[in-house]
Image (cartoon, coloured by chain):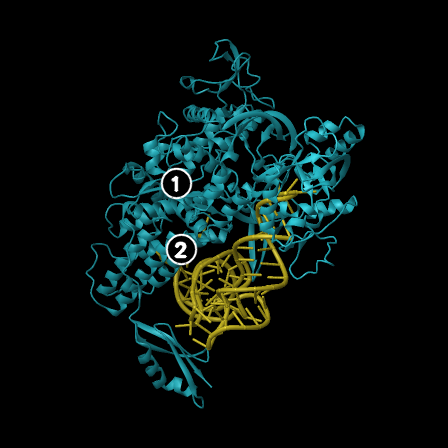
Chain colours: A cyan, B yellow
RNA sequence: GCCGCCGUAGCUCAGUGGUAGAGCGCAUCCUUGGUAAGGCUGAGGUCGGCAGUUCAAUCCUGCCCGGCGGCACCA
């Protein structure tokens, strides 16, 4: 018996697949359903990590399964080629970002191909290919013509380390998502995509995404943050400040609490506050507000401070009632109107503020069961349900009707109207970087901002950019930006900002449907393949990439480029790959491959191989270079083969959860690979023996069909670990029916079992599956073999063993024919001597028989 | 604070209103021309806690405890 040798078989089968071109997506064919399987394409960092292995193996298992089920599968791969790491490498090592990126792509392509993925490589592209980003520029200009692109000065998030602007979605806890630097606020001329125009669609569209994780939908819902309320203006008592003749406009979600108002507040960067800053005291207060730090994290934790401007406004429902106008640091300029009315009794922030500055606190919502004469608010605002009181015409109404009544009155008075406000902001897409897709416009003194005509696209990056210094290499290139105006023919300057790389990844899935189309998207191809049936990637993109892509897809769809509104019909977010961490006593991190684990009974110790120093075994954390707890996929492939690695990443945990990489785990997978091979290897060659009835063979057949059913259901539900657990059980069962000395019927049943088994393991361990399939004389390659069927009748045993309970406790068992009628079963049970003994001295009250499952006798 | 997920063998996880399972680890034994291995057998579980529904709850319901994640001056 020869041991299974993946080093020989794996390259052999990969070559066979490539030679037969089996993964090329087919043209539309009548009666053949399409299936678009996609994993989030990688950034070409230079080497594959275990996260990639998990991501692409998950997607591949699904794609291979769907192909076996008869779908015309599109499963492409490409590269998210632009981005800062290339510039950083350029700065640190003096290499060219383009060369660095394409070399990385070449290296990673080899590694991905080694993984045995069922990819249609003929469709590969990188977003940094001019052919790709030129098409991106084309649709960008289309969206500009449709009013979805604009430029304005605005306060932006500035990453001082990466020297670029970040979108709101890219600021995490006040820090840049890549650099980790504390983000500053800066005023800059910025390009925006009008994602807020699509806020309602993006929100409502979530309801149709029933194959997305609930969690991601919830996160997007929270991020978009739609709130309904009212926008209205307070009239100034006395002379209004210049520019505020129409009053001071505020936004509220609680117009029902207007009679509880005790002040009006504006943000420190509100235009009115800026106007008042001529007063040194106001200026000093505004300076105080900014002092707390520019980072969002600091703003959020700052203490509430305020300044009474001395201005007063009239209450909209009572002109004689004057409210003071305060500047307060907790009010955000970029939400609503940057001004609010404060109702301390029913808003915690307003209450904190009112207590500090001794402002009135008047409850206007009475909780159920409370006495209006005695109800008061201490340090906790009341935000629950109740009845409005102390509120004149609103008295006695519940909250929702009161909101409607208050809005109606504001509208009748011409002071305001109901309004919907979003937390979502427009998407700032310009980056001050040289290694990105240029914004395809020129600036002309005479004509202003002029789009580059379509026939002059792509606006390509120059070959000779200087990346030796920080900042934007495009602005300091000697000649690139100088051009002529397409409008007047005069001298003009190119825009040197480039697009956020999230723009690049917001439509690549549509480009894959025809990567060489003369237009950004070939509509016929996109309408055949889109939407993506199953998208697989990390949860970290829940509100970044996945929201941008939904927006861009909708915008392109509205521009007539494709029909599908939502790009990803099914989404699966896989967990991270984690590993134990190891440190020396001096705190230095140690890599897993540098140490050996010593097992003594139930305890584990570790020591460094090179010098025997004791190593402390630490927590299990996400694999990262900084903690040195990574395992290089290539090292694993070399020792155990690709299939064992694929099997382990799929078997260990439910795919959506974090999985723990461990040496013993992959060894277990490797042993499974060998045990599988041994079963195939021990089966006699030649044609399948003729099947004939035999109890032993029937038992195996039943188990085979049950396993096919269970694995099919597991794969359908993306519960690969569960499916693999069933295959482990199946293999254990198969060993009860050794080929050596087996009867002909059992050999036939074994052949059926192995034939099904080769196809069941094919999505997970595709190389082993081919070798096994060939060993038992399967037709063609298993990669194109149909998924095995199961016979429902065979998945059930003819004889059932039913546990017999007495008062809910198991007291014995009986054998009956499957499907035996309850009345008959009851008779058999009561005639059973063992059971009868258990019932001695008891009166039978009731006998419950659940068909084919259990018998329970209630007695006392 | 709000929302969500999770808690089953030493570890990582399946599972089901009705007999508690797998891999790894552990123990015993066998094999020693599959050998930096293979195999047999076994131990190990108040299914996080309490209560409720039920003939029967690890599973359903409620409350509590513990862990993880997301959001959070968004008016």
Task: Say whether residue A639 is left or right of residue B9.
Answer: left
Front position in the image: A365 or B20: A365
Callout 1: SS: loop
Which tag, 1 or 2, sits closer to the chain's start? 1
Where residue A169 appears, x then y in whole percent? 56, 37
User: What is the crowding at mark 1: few (fewer than 14 residues within 10 Å), some, or many (at least 20)?
Assistant: many
Where residue A485 appears, x then y in whole percent? 49, 12
Callout count: 2
Task: Please identify the residue farthest to the top as the structure is shown.
Answer: A490
Task: Say whether residue A455 is left or right of residue A306.
Answer: left
Report the residue marked by disc 2. A724
The image shows residue A717, relative to residue B50, as above or below, that is: above
Report the residue marked by disc 1. A532
The image shows residue A451, relative to residue A421, as above or below, that is: above
Where residue A657 appears, x then y in whole percent? 50, 51
Q: Residue at x 59, y 47 (%)?
A: A405
Front position in the image: A233 or A129: A233
Name the quarter where the N terminus of chain A is drawn.
Answer: bottom left
Mark 1–mark 2 distance (CA, rounded to whole Å): 26 Å
- Tell me the quarter of the picture where residue A369 sits: bottom right
User: What is the crowding at mark 2: few (fewer than 14 residues within 10 Å), some, or many (at least 20)?
Assistant: many
Q: Residue at x 74, y 52 (%)?
A: A379
Q: Nearer the viewer, mark 1 or mark 2?
A: 1
């Amino acid at each position: 018996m020869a041991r299974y040798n993946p080093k020989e078989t794996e390259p052999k089968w990969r070559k066979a697949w490539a030679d037969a071109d089996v993964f090329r997506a087919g043209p539309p064919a009548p009666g053949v359903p399409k299936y678009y399987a996609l994993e989030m394409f990688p950034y070409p960092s230079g080497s594959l990590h275990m996260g990639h292995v998990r991501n692409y193996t998950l997607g591949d298992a699904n794609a291979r399964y769907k192909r076996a089920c008869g779908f015309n599968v599109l499963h492409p791969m490409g590269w998210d080629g632009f981005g800062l790491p290339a510039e950083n490498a350029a700065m640190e090592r003096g290499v060219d970002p383009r060369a660095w990126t394409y070399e990385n792509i070449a290296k990673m392509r080899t590694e991905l191909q080694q993984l045995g993925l069922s990819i249609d490589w003929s469709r590969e592209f990188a977003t940094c290919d001019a052919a790709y980003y030129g098409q991106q520029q084309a649709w960008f200009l289309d969206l500009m013509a449709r009013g979805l692109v604009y430029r304005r000065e605005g306060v932006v998030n500035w990453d001082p380390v990466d020297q670029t602007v970040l979108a709101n979605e890219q600021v995490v806890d006040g820090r840049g998502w890549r650099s980790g630097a504390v983000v500053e606020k800066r005023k800059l001329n910025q390009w925006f995509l009008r994602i807020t125009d699509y806020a309602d669609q993006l929100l409502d569209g979530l309801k149709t995404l029933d194959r997305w994780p609930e969690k991601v939908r919830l996160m997007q819902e929270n991020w978009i943050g739609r709130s309904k309320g009212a926008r209205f203006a307070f009239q100034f008592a006395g002379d209004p400040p210049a520019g505020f003749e129409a009053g001071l406009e505020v936004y509220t979600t609680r117009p029902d609490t207007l009679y509880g108002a005790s002040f009006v507040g504006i943000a420190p960067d509100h235009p009115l506050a800026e106007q008042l800053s001529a007063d040194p005291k106001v200026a000093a207060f505004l300076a105080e507000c900014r002092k707390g730090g520019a980072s969002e994290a600091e703003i959020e934790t700052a203490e509430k401070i305020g300044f009474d401007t001395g201005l007063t406004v009239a209450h909209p429902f009572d002109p004689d009632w004057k409210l003071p106008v305060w500047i307060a640091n907790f009010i955000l300029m970029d939400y609503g109107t940057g001004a609010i009315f404060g109702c301390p009794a029913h808003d915690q922030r307003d209450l904190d503020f009112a207590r500090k500055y001794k402002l009135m606190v008047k409850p206007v919502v009475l909780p159920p069961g409370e006495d209006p004469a005695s109800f008061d608010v201490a340090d906790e605002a009341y935000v629950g349900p109740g009845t409005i009181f102390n509120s004149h015409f609103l008295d006695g109404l519940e909250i929702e009707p009161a909101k409607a009544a208050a809005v109606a009155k504001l509208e009748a008075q011409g002071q305001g109207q109901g309004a919907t406000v979003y937390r979502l902001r427009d998407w700032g897409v310009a980056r001050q970087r040289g290694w990105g897709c240029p914004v395809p416009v020129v600036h002309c003194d005479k004509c202003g901002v002029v789009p580059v005509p379509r026939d002059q696209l792509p606006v390509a990056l120059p070959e000779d950019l200087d990346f030796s210094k920080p900042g934007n290499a495009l602005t300091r290139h000697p000649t690139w930006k100088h051009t002529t105006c397409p409008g007047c023919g005069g001298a003009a300057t190119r825009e040197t900002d480039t697009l956020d790389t999230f723009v690049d990844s917001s439509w690549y899935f549509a480009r894959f449907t025809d990567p060489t189309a003369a237009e950004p998207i070939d509509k016929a191809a996109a309408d055949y393949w889109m939407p993506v049936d199953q998208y697989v990637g990390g949860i970290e993109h829940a509100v970044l990439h996945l929201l941008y892509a939904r927006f861009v897809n909708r915008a392109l769809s509205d521009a007539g480029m494709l029909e599908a509104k939502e790009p990803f019909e099914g989404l699966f977010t896989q967990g991270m790959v984690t590993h134990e961490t190891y440190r020396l006593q001096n705190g230095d991190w140690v890599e897993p491959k540098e140490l050996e684990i010593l097992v003594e009974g139930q305890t584990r110790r570790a020591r460094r191989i090179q010098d025997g120093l004791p190593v402390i075994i630490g927590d299990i954390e996400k694999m990262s270079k900084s903690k040195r707890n990574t395992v290089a996929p290539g090292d694993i492939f070399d020792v155990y083969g690709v299939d064992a690695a694929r099997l382990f990443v799929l078997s260990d945990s439910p795919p959506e959860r974090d999985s723990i990489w461990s040496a013993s785990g992959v060894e277990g997978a490797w042993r499974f690979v060998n045990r599988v091979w041994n079963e195939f290897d021990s089966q006699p060659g030649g044609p399948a023996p003729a099947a004939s009835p035999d109890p032993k063979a029937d038992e195996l057949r039943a188990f085979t069909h049950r396993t096919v059913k269970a694995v099919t259901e597991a794969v359908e539900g993306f519960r690969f670990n569960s499916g693999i657990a069933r295959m482990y059980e199946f293999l254990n069962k198969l060993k009860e029916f050794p080929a050596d000395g087996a009867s002909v019927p059992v050999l036939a049943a074994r052949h059926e079992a192995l034939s099904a088994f080769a196809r069941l393991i094919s999505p997970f361990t595709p190389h082993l599956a081919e070798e096994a399939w060939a060993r038992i004389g399967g037709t063609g390659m298993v990669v194109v073999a149909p998924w095995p069927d199961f016979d429902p009748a065979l998945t059930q045993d003819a004889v059932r063993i039913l546990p017999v309970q007495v008062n809910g406790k198991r007291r014995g068992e009986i054998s009956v024919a499957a499907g035996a009628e309850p009345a008959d079963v009851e008779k058999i049970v009561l005639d059973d001597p063992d059971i009868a003994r258990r019932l001695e001295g008891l009166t039978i009250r009731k006998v419950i028989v659940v068909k084919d499952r259990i018998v329970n006798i209630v007695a006392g």
